[in-house]
Amino acid sequence: MSSSTAECRKRRQTDSKDLRHGNNKRQLIQNTLHYFFQKDTTTTAQKEAKKEEIDNNGNITLKDIKETKEKTEDNILPSACPICGTLFTDVCVETYEIHVNSCLDNTNESSNEDTTRKTWSKIFSAAAYKIRGIWSHQKNDIAPGLNESETSWFGEPRSSTTTPSAPKRRSVPYYKRLAGTKMVVDAFTYGEIPGCEGYLLSHFHSDHYMGLSPSWIHGPIYCSEITARLVEQKLGVSSEFIFPLPMNSACLLSGSDQLRVTLIDANHCPGAVLFLITTNDNLRYLHTGDFRACPKMCLHPMLKGLPLDIVYLDTTYLDPKYSFPSQDSCVQAACDLVRRHNGVNNEDPSSLKEKRLDHWFSQEKKEIINGHGLPIVATDKRLLVVVGTYSLGKEIVFIEIAKTLNSKIFVTDQKRAILECFHDQELEALLTDQGQEAQVHVIPLGHIQAENLEAYFRSLQPHFTQMIAFRPTGWTFRASSDPQLQHQQRSLESIIRARPPDLSASTLEPIYDTPFVKIYGVPYSEHSSYRELALFIASLDIRRIVPTVNVYSETNRLRMSLLFDKWHRDRSKLVKDNDGKIKLIGYPSVDYW
């Protein structure tokens, strides 16, 4: 038995010692695969686009970046913070996330568990919708492992005998249940789910772990090792219920389903994973959670060339107008911009370190009188780079900028506690709690505002003479609204050809600009673009797709269904041209298409 397998099985009181291989024959898929949806009675949320307003004094005030986006379970907020119980009404996702991240960073405040349990708002109404399965070979087939007469595996009985006056348990949405099993994914806001034997947590973002607290007793939580440490340390969940699993190793979960689960890096945030589930009947499901698709995933030995019966897909940006650049080019553009502001041209990286050292020792020094009348020695032209982040995510941006400047990274004690959950010694060696020592400072994303940064910069003078700040978020991206272009990019062939240009420093314009403080938005997204979703689907042997985002509008469901059907037909042509084999779509790097 390998050490990784032994590790994933420890702490279980009852555990099978042998893997059950099940039948080699796939179970026949009969009748129809029903998708049950709850009726969305809300109107479309109209949110303002990003604007810059100039006041009478000529100062620029930044508004939050917002998008017009349909209300879904992913952006309809609960009525209370899961940490402190603060009530919310009519706030945007970003405002809510900023508050939750702030609570996570404040380790002195305890959560109000009773309030948290009582104040979750109901997301679903009683009515259910059904649409046919996507990419089914037949229009009539039911979920694998179930009979048509059984209770739906999406949590809603096919026919209900409950009287209208009786209280009704809030149902678990279909895409959070693994077909024909007793496992759910990111479904912690529903309390104890009858018949559920295990809860999978894809990553440590508040919209996925909502419902977890020190009072959690409803069942085992399976997740990555990084996520496990965060859940225990930041949310106070008892280790008795947390079962960390190793990456890239099939683990047999305890329970009647006899499921084998493999964790694959989701390219989203530290600890985020894809769940590859193999049932006792050798059916294979892939739940992506939140992810940024890349060729490396399709090259994974447990995915490449092997069939996937169902893929539960993160469809956040399933729209041709979302075609943002690769993460690598965004990070490179930010680093190049830092070099430019630091007085270093974009040269060969091997010469940069030597130049930085020469520049450091040759700097002129001057005396500045501080508020106490004492001289302070300050270097000439010292750049400060501020990077906004959530409690978790965007780490690569500030790490690469720090390497570019050969600098330490200033973080708060609370942020350090989160970063130390990664167990990354190289990263920990870069951290410091001395703000004057580091040229790179990490602050909450919501604080990347002109007024805040001006005050922050003044507080650090004379140690720094210029500040640039980065707001790395997908919301920075300005989507194309050309309907003709969007129509052209519906076929796989056109999507494959239409690779978006890489981002460059020359294309980045400040959204706030003064001689001493500048703010830049960088379209660094941790979700898949439209093109990346298409190429991910085209590169794998997928039998059926279940979308997990933006599914509460009948119009959206129909649009996605038609699009996936078209991509299926287009992929069939590609397979035919490749001697009947599915071929990984070409890529410039295994890290991006």
Image (cartoon, rainbow, N blue to C red):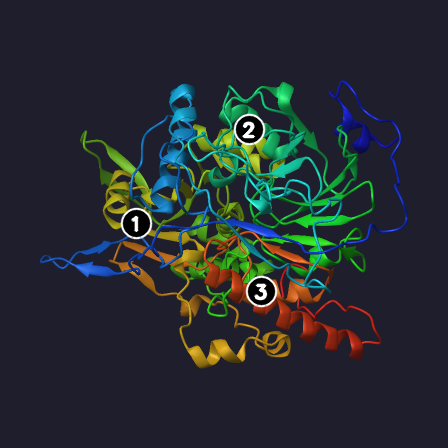
* Residue 237 vs residue 24, the one in the foreground: 24
Above or below 122: residue 310: below
Q: Residues within 10 Å of mark 2 (few under 14, many from 20)?
A: many
Identify the residue position indicated by label 1 in the image: 465
Residue type, numbered disc 3: Ser
CA gap between label 1 and label 2 equals 40 Å
Query: Where is residue 144 shown, x and y percent of the image?
Result: 74, 48
Which element is circle 2 on? Answer: helix
CA gap between label 3 and label 2 equals 36 Å
Residue drawn at x 62%, y 57% as measured from the top left: 293
Query: Where is residue 499 shown, x and y percent of the image?
Result: 57, 73
Disc number for residue 231: 2
Identify the residue position indicated by label 3 in the image: 561
Residue 423 visible in the picture = no
Residue drawn at x 58%, y 60% as measured from the top left: 349
Q: Is residue 562 left or right of residue 384?
A: right
